Amino acid sequence: MYALPMAAKLGLWLLPLLASVPAGDAASAPAKVTGLAPDCVDAEILGSVRRQTPLDVGDAMVVRWPWIVDIDVDRVLTGRAPLGRLRVQTFQHTYYTTDLHRWWLRRNTLGGLNMYPADEKRGARLCDPAAPPQRPFVDPGPRTTLDALQREGEARYGRGPGD
């Protein structure tokens, strides 16, 4: 006999509630994780994903979780962003293809960038240059670094599809 997945046993209506509930040691993880939607963006770009690492959120049941992603910015469509390789934070469910994608970038308080898939129906509203940066999706805190969190994610999940 096959065991039913937990979602089937509990009912699918519970999934939104469970998606943010940490289990096991995830509740005591040193990194703070937030997923905030931008009210404005600093740039809309065309870029290709080159490296993407899901961060270890423990044994939590989540639909999307934070990743550290290296992208090659090929073209800035609106706003200001550097061309070339950038390391960004994003929320996603699985790996993106390395094809060219349209992304929104928003400065964060760590001095880096948060990245969102562009919503072409909504359109991008550019931030005023004096607008304060957004909170990062992941703040590693004083005890670790984003590089260390990326290494932990690669140790748990591998370096990419097929690992």
Image (tube, rainbow, N blue to C red):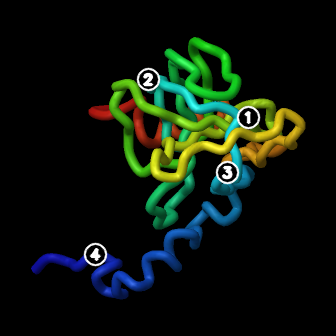
Contact (Cβ within 8 Å) of mark 1 with mark 3: no
Residue at the spot x=57%, y=15% of the render?
Answer: 85
Q: Position of residue 60 (x, y in %)?
A: 51, 64
Image point (55%, 27%), residue name: 45
**Amino acid at the residue labelled 2:** Ser
Quadrant location, the N terminus:
bottom left
C-alpha span from label 3 to label 4: 34 Å
Q: Secondary structure at mark 1?
A: loop
Q: CA distance from mark 2 to mark 1?
A: 25 Å
> Does the residue at mark 2 contact the one at mark 1 (Cβ under 8 Å)?
no
Tell me if mark 3 has few (under 14), some (14-19) or many (20+) residues whose alpha carbon lies within 10 angstroms of its own.
Answer: some
Give SS at disc 2. Answer: strand
Q: Earlier in the sequence, mark 4 or mark 2?
A: 4
- For label 1, the residue is 145
Which residue shows up at 89% across the image and 37% down it?
130
Q: Is residue 141 left or right of residue 96?
A: right
Separation of marks 4 and 2 at Cα, in angstroms = 35 Å
Task: Tell me, for residue 48, which label it has, or none.
Answer: 2
Front-most of 126 and 84?
Answer: 126
For label 4, the crowd category at 10 Å Cα-Cα, with few meaning under 14, some 14 to 19 and many 20 or more, is few
Q: Is residue 114 left or right of residue 98?
A: right
Residue under label 3? 38
Sequence-wise first label, 2 or 1: 2
Mark 4, mark 2: which one is toward the viewer?
2
- Residue 27 — which label? none
Choose between 83 and 12: the one closer to the eye. 83
Label 3, label 2: how far apart the Cα atoms are? 21 Å
**Along the line of sight, the residue nearer the viewer: 52 or 154:** 52
**Pointers 1 and 4 in contact (C-beta within 8 Å):** no
The residue under label 4 is 5
